[in-house]
Amino acid sequence: MPDMPAAGAWLVLFLLVQRLAELLLARTNTARLRAAGAVEFGAGHYPLMVAMHACWLAALWIFGHDRAVSAPWLAVFILLQAARVWVIATLGRRWTTRVLVSPGAPPIAAGPYRWLRHPNYAVVALELAVVPLMLGLPALALIVSAANAAMLWWRIGVENAALGWAAGSDGAAGGDRPPPLPMRDRDDSYAPGFAPGDAGCGNRRP
């Protein structure tokens, strides 16, 4: 299967449009969840996650816009996009890039969540590596995978704590707040009633 010459720019533009569309969808879902009383955990790490993905896109453009796209890796990428759509469709209006939970709500257990606890993060981790490999940039794939592993270690810990809090909550009203988290993971400005994807990025949200 031959490579696709000079298709790198089109690939990066596709990713940019996709991420922007996902941010709009996540923002809508986040606003709806917050209005319904959902509580946010780990807001402090969110700008770092967004910055990491923005740097990834910038590096892809700088180093890969004029490169050919590997056809075998493109096939893997297409499968990952199907998995991404499956995750978002399964979560529906609960999909967001922030860690939001509703007291007492059960976790999603349908679709890919029947087999994996964090399928969205698995898709994103693979995508962050596969796209640079499509463009013949193995060093970028290694660097961003290492950065993402550190980010996921942090985020999954926050998310598991949030899910545990939601499962243990009796759902009593408005004054309920999450238990104290390390300072790096707290959002002291949070007030119930206010709103984008793991990166791209969403996962299971009660």
Image (cartoon, helix red, strand yellow):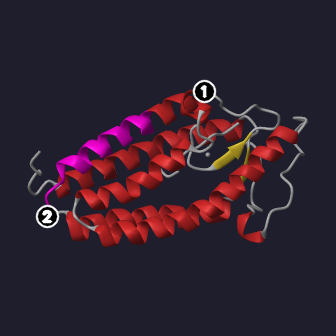
Q: Is residue 187 left or right of residue 96?
A: right
175 w.r.t. 138: above or below: above
Disc 1 designates what residue?
110
Query: Picture coordinates of residue 191 (x, y %)?
Result: 77, 51
Quarter holding residue 80: top left
Query: Picture coordinates of residue 183 (x, y %)?
Result: 77, 70
- Residue 66: which disc? 2
**Residue located at (49% from left, 52% from top):** 199
Label 2 or label 1, whichever lies nearer to me, is 1
User: Which amino acid type corresponds to the residue marked 2 in the rendered image?
Assistant: Asp
In the depicted view, which residue is nearer to us: 155 or 123? 123
**Residue located at (13% from left, 64% from top):** 66
Q: Is residue 32 left or right of residue 56?
A: right
**Marks 2 and 1, how far apart at CA:** 41 Å
Q: Is residue 156 left or right of residue 64?
A: right
165 w.r.t. 53: above or below: above
